[in-house]
Amino acid sequence: MLVLIDESGDPAFKIAKGSTSHFVIALVAFDDFKEAERAAAAIADLRTRLHVKPEFKFAKSADPVRDAFFDEVCSFHFTARALVVDKAKVYSEHLRADADQFYNYFLQLLLKHDGGLLRGANVKLDGSGSKEFRQALNTYLRAQLREGQIGKFKFADSAGDDLIQLADMVAGAILRSYRGDDRKNAWRWRTALARAGRLGDVWDFL
């Protein structure tokens, strides 16, 4: 199993100064590596056809690009799951003050409550991080999760990984559904995933 993870929104709490009201961390899981390769090739081809450079990013894409992207990828067999954090409901001063701990905590919640999906998964996350951060996160996750959930675990640069871009687009589509200022399009791309049967559980952190 191959699992790609990315987030949308930010871990900051200065909502009045531009921080997002919600934070979404999403995973995309492929049971079949061959299917994952086909999806990656289709995304790369679509990026060329649409003249998207250097990568697909939900937040930076125009609506027609988003439409074309989800039309393309929803024909492939994957499952997406997400955890949505309304930051107004986060009361821990530790999580509010430390972005790394905020990210790590909600990442392990997403993986721990997987509905039995993950089995020896090879996990890729967007980003780089220092060697110390990567090692600490790896140790933390393995201590928190069931034995056998995760096999390999690594970071990848989204600009060079088509499937991390898929995870970004999924996370962005879900975050958009929580925007109150865009009722016309808020659910547009999340609904596309759901109608195609690609969207599993979307868990609102309470």
Image (cartoon, helix red, strand yellow):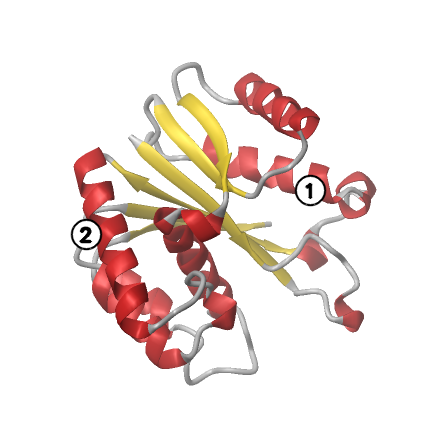
Q: Dot 1, how many residues are within 10 Å of its Cα: few (below 14), some (14-19), or many (20+)? A: some
Q: Provide residue 89's location: percent of width, then percent of height.
A: 69, 54
Q: Residue at x 66, y 23 (%)?
A: 136
**Residue 172 visible in this rendered orientation of the protein:** yes
Q: Residue furthest bottom?
A: 184
Q: Amino acid at mark 1?
A: Phe
Locate residue 64, reporting x and y percent: 34, 80
Q: Where is residue 152 drawn, in percent x and y? A: 42, 22
Question: What residue type is disc 2 on?
Answer: Phe
Q: Which residue is mark 2?
A: 76
Q: Secondary structure at mark 2?
A: loop
In the foreground, 143 or 70? 70
Q: Is residue 138 left or right of residue 133?
A: left
Rounded to the nearest angstrom, the CA distance separating label 2 from label 1 is 32 Å
Say which residue label 1 marks: 102
Where residue 35 sits, quadrant-wise, is top left
Q: Position of residue 170 (x, y in %)?
A: 40, 57
- How many tags in the picture? 2
Badge 1 marks a residue whose secondary structure is helix
